[in-house]
Structure formats: C-alpha cells, structure tokens
Image (tube, rainbow, N blue to C red):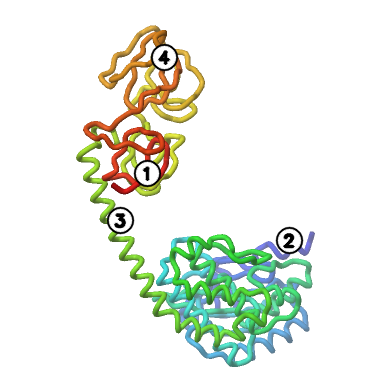
Amino acid sequence: MARTNQTTRPLLRPRQRLGKYRIEKRLAEGGFAVVYRAYDTIEGVRVALKVPHPHLLNAQVMESFRREVRLAARLDHQAILPLKNAEVVNGHFIIVSALGVETLAQRLSRRLSLAKALHYGHQLLQAVACAHRHRIIHCDIKPENVILFPGDRLRLTDFGIAKVARRTVQASGTGTVGYLAPDQALGRPSFRSDVFSLGLVLYRMLSGHLPQWPFEWPPPGIERLRGRVHPELIALIRKSLELKPQRRFRDAGQMLAAYERVLPRALSWSRRRRRQRKNHHDWQQVRFRQFRRSYGAVLEARHTCPRCQGPVSEPMFFCPWCGKAREVHQQPTRFPAQCRRCGRGMKLDWTYCPWCYGPGYEPAGNRQYTDVRYQARCSNPRCPRRELMPWMRYCPWCHRKVRRRWQMPNNTARCTHCRWGVLRQFWSYCPWCGKALQVP
C-alpha cells in the first residue's frame, strides 16, 4: 500500500523550485513518471518536465537511461522531439524537453480532417524512418508519445526512454499492451514491430477506431475508412497490420516510400470526394426548399431528420430523403398530448394512438374536440366518432386499422409496396414503409 501511495501522489507542487525550473502545473501521470509544465528561469521558456517515480529508479535503471539518452541524442530530425536535458536535481531525476500544445491522443478526441490526418501520418513516418536509419527501434509508438506544436508540426518523443520505462514498470507488475505488435508483446521487437504500431496509429487517425487483438481484418470502423480514404492507402495500412512480421514493410523507410507514392492520389481523391459531397449537399438543399414551398404546409413538414436534415412530418415513420427509421418521434409536437409509445401527438379526446398500435388511454374528459384536419371516416360502422385525419394508421376511437390508402394532394404517385401516396420527384424512400422508391 505504501508503494501505491508513493506512486500516485504528486511529487512536486506548483511554484516549487527544482534547480532553475519552477513547477507550474501537472500535465499527466502514468505508471512510470509524472509530467509537469515548468518555467525555465534562466532561458525564460516553458518546458515539459518528466519526473520518474523514485521507487522505480535504481542503479541499473539509471545506467539504462544513460545509454538510451546517448542513443536518442544521435537523432536529428524536425519530427523528433530532442531532449533538452536529463539530470538529477535536488534528488529528483528529471527529463526536460520542449513544451508542445497537446498530444496526438488529446487531439484525436476532436474531429480531425482527412488532409490533416494524412499530414500528421507523413510526419510520423518520417520520424520513425529516421530512427530506423540509425538502427534505433522506438518500441512504443502511440498517440500519447506524439506531441503537437503550432503550425500543425508533429514531433515523436520518448525514444529509448519508453523502452526503459516499460521494462521498469512491467517489472513492478503493471503496464498495458497498448499499440504493441503481437511479436513485440512476445519479446521479439524489430523494425517491423514499429511498422505495426504505425499502422495502428494511422488506422485510428483515419477511421476513429483502434483495432484490438486478434487484429482480424476488416477491423471496426472499416466502412468509415473506405468512405474517406483512397483504396491504395487502405492496402498500405492493411500490409502494415499483418500478423506475420515478414509480410509487413521491412522498416519505416520502406513504408514511408510507399506512403509518399500514394499520398498525392489520396489527397486528390479526397478533394474530389469533398467536391462531390458539397455538390450533392447543395442539390439536396435546393430539393428541400422546393419541397417546402410545394408541400411543406400541406404535409406539416415542420421537423427535420437528424441524419440528413431533410424536412419530415410527424406521421412519417421513415425519412423520405435518407431512409432513416423514425419509430419514435423525438421532436416537439403541436398536439396537446403525446403517445408514450411512439412520441407522436394526440388529442385529449382520443382513446387510442392513431399512429402506432399502442395501448389505450383514458380521455381527459367528455368534451369532444373538433378539428379541420378531420377529412375521412373510419370503416367501422360501430365506431363512436369515425373521424380520421390524413396518414392515420389506426382509428383513435375504436382502434381499427385504417384500410384507406392515403394519397398525396394533387399527386397520384403511390409506393409500389404499401400503396400509400409518395412524391417521387422529391423523395428517395417511402416515408410510410421505408422501401426505396423507383426514380420517375
């Protein structure tokens, strides 16, 4: 218990001095270290200060750090975050680096455009390719180890240090697999292990999903990936995620070369798709306006579909523009009451919901309410009122199913499936049964 408390409690306090550094804020904490934002009182800049937990440090770990820091110092690339300093100050071992805006993991919590994701992926591949040219395996490529700087610049960090940290934390009985390749998790890291981790990061940036073990293809999010990304780029990612290391790219340099070949086509393909979607969106808006002018008032289409933003009316059980089901009406109604089952409006003297086959209701009183929208009569001769509004499915007085096939005003087109009236010049789906409509 003492070790747990020592690990989780903050090592340093705000405004505390550590040599020339003044602690300002704790940024993150993991099983190996705590990261602080600090102010360098000599250089006058803010830096990131990583302070490992004291109970994890011993002579063997410190020697490993010295060796890995010297190894990482050989890397000189604009997409690799260099260490400003690594030393013992006032009994604390500190690792100092430049302070970025946020990590890639934090950035992925918000919407990321395709062009920016491709730009980040290119920089990340360049950083790892530089390390592989120097015969250095990163061993811990993940969004948390990618720092973003102003101007959409990206820098990969924790070269070598991540390897020491993971070995030390795992020896203490904690740690997670994260973005590790299966062969690396089995103790056989190689350049191809970094390639696998790069594939996972690319997949998450482009699809919003992180594949999990057993890494079967296609992973979750493949439909979104296919809708956004050029097929050749998908093939590149799939090759990097092969379970057998010999089937992947041999290193990040080979993967970078393949990425740079497909990148121009991926960007132009993305621009074409964006223009197509914009043109389709503009055309849809024209159709929406024309529909509202011609039929919006007649059909009382004062609501909108949450998926396509097309105008819909309360009795519709499907969006006529995109086909999205509307079993439950989740928007306001102008009726004085609502059905507990389907959410559609009801009048206070109705005994049953006329839109769904819901349970009966106790009328609010004996008063009978008139309405200009009553335009038809129930086929049941024993029905007490027999008055029906357009598009009712059931009689609100006797609960009998309405046999009438409702027709659009001034339009004879009907759905070939349910035979109810439709507007083929506007709609792609029948709003009453959900079936796709044939183009007139």
Say what amino acid the circle numbered 4 marks. Answer: Trp
Give the spatial CA distance, label 1 vs label 4. 30 Å
**Number of the front mark, 4 or 3:** 4
Task: Give the camera-side residue of 182 and 400.
Answer: 400
Front-lying residue, 426 or 250: 426
Tag 3: amino acid:
His
- Marking on residue 429: 1
Which numbered disc flags the more N-terminal residue, 3 or 2? 2
User: Do labels 2 and 4 touch, CB within 8 Å?
Assistant: no
Direction from residue 317 to residue 98 in the image, left or right = right
| Image spot of residue 58 (x, y percent) | 77, 79
Q: CA distance from mark 3 to mark 2?
A: 56 Å
Q: Which residue, given by chain and number where applicable, does mark 3 sit on?
A: 281
Identify which amino acid the numbered label 2 is placed on: Asn
Name the secondary structure under disc 2.
helix
Q: CA distance from mark 2 to mark 1?
A: 61 Å
Whether residue 89 can be seen here? no
> Tag 3: Cα neighbours inside 10 Å, few (<14), some, or many (≥20)?
few
What residue is drawn where x is 55% and y is 77%?
21
Above or below residue 198? Residue 320 is: above
- Residue 213: image quadrant is bottom right
| Residue count near mark 1 (Cα–Cα under 10 Å), binned few <14, some 14–19, many ≥20 | many
Cα separation between marks 4 and 3: 43 Å
Neighbour tally class for label 4: few under 14, some 14-19, many 20 plus, Cα within 10 Å: many
| Residue ID at (23%, 50%) | 286
Residue name at image x 45 percent, y 18 percent: 400
Residue receiving disc 2: 5
Instruction: Using the image as rendered, state which of residue 236 and residue 9 is in the foreground.
Output: 236
Q: Which residue is mark 4?
A: 397
Q: Position of residue 93 (x, y in %)?
A: 67, 79
State how far apart marks 1 and 3 are (Cα): 18 Å
